[in-house]
Amino acid sequence: MTLTNSHQPFSFSALKRGYANPHKLYDDLRATDPIYFDSLSQCWIVTGYAEVIAILEDERFTSDLGTYSPKSAMGWDAVQATLTQSVFFKDGIEHQHANHYLLKHIAQTAKRLTNDIKTIVHQRFSTLAPDGSMDIVKDFASAISFAATLRVLGIDIDEQQKFIRFLGYSETISDIASGYPVGNAQDLAMLISYLRQQVAQKKKAPSDDLISAFLAAPDIFPDEEAVLSSTLMILTAGHVTTKKLIGTGTAKILDRWPELQAEFVNNPALPKLICEEALRMSPPTRYIARWARQDADLSEQFPGKHHIRRGQKVLLFLEAANYDPRYFENPKEFNLAHRPVKHLTFGFGKHRCPGASIARIEAHASLQELLHLSHLKLDPAHPAVWNPNPILGGFRSCPVTFDPHQ
């Protein structure tokens, strides 16, 4: 799928329109130029594996949303202002210290909460398994990822209706954070107010959770607003990451389900292998943005006219990089042997997602439960529905059926 204009054969607009199946366009873009300037949108589109890594590691590019991201024109400024205050959207020493601190606490949390997360998954699975059908995104993946993220943060929402309502708010904040503002701004303001109360309570009575860990590091998170913004970022990123991995990732391998289920009998480590390939094929975020903080000429490193000007936006398509045939053989095929080349779903190097270990625990536990379901397949009476957000993509809804008696 390309545009007919001979002067602009590719565009960011075309990639957004074709988000459900963009791989032909990725292939064409990569073959033309893995670092391509879209004159229509005035941004650079990066689709190559090595090229994405190079820019992620290049200090001349920044992810500082507070400086470069335009303000919303749809009433979301309060939400965006809160998100952009998070130290995790900054660069330099400040970001490195925060990321290192979070990595340390996430590692400790992963060890401490592994059984709790497995219990969350098992309880949700046990509720749905007797029915013989479910929406693997809405009923299973979304509820699990939200509950697990709340547990990591130290937030306890016992009331089911309140849980469901706040889960919806989190979905909308995920859209806003990715630049796709939909939903009710007033409802989101209520969620931020609720989180603000949680931060204030943790300040008075800290416990063994991530919000308390933020509050215990005033050199990194200097005030309650900094803690609030980082809490909101964790809630958003943690929820959307595992929801897409479990929901969309599982849906993509249903045609091989009998084979995988049979192999699981003799290979208990199979869920971990499936998880990594599902992560490669269905990254939670299709692309991430960087801005050039100064002129950067990449022409010698990557042949072509790649003189990126100060202030220009660069879109790093993690999804395209994960399908780069120069690094992954037959990348459009689900293949458990695609390692040892590492996918870029969780970023790379110092920009690697600190919550990756928690996401993997949730995914491993979920796949372990799902692999006990026989004849798991898409529900022919209720087709899957794509998430209209072109940045996140994946399924918004994916009904499946299975044999509840086996």
Image (spheres, helix red, strand yellow):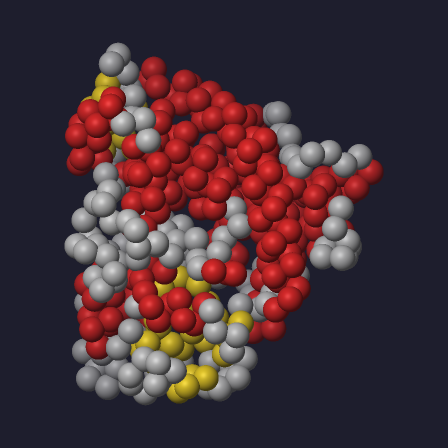
Tell me which corner region of the image, top left, top right, bottom left or bottom right, holds residue 272: top left
In the image, taking residue 132 as reference, residue 220 lies left or right, namely: right
How far across and how far down the image is residue 50, in percent? 33, 68
Front position in the image: 341 or 400: 341
Front one among 244 and 381: 244
Question: Would residue 99 be visible to someone looking at this image?
Answer: yes
Compared to residue 112, the image places residue 238 above or below, namely: below
Quadrant containing the N terminus is bottom left
Residue 178 appears in the figure: no
Q: Percent position (x, y) of residue 397?
A: 34, 39
Q: What residue is drawn where x is 18% and y is 49%?
A: 333
The reply, left or right, for residue 325 in relation to residue 11 is: left
Residue 362 x/y as whole percent: 45, 34
Name the side, left or right, on which 254 lies relative to 155.
Answer: left
Q: In the image, residue 149 lies at what x, y percent?
A: 55, 38
Residue at 60 percent across and 55 percent down: it is 99
Q: Quadrant of residue 297?
A: bottom left
Find residue 318 and report its image quarter. Answer: bottom left
Residue at 33% x, 31% y is 269
Foreground of the two, 168 or 52: 52
Residue at image coords 72%, 55%: 221
How many numbered dots are placed on residues in this image?
0
Q: Quadrant of the C terminus?
A: top left
- Residue at the outermost top position: 405
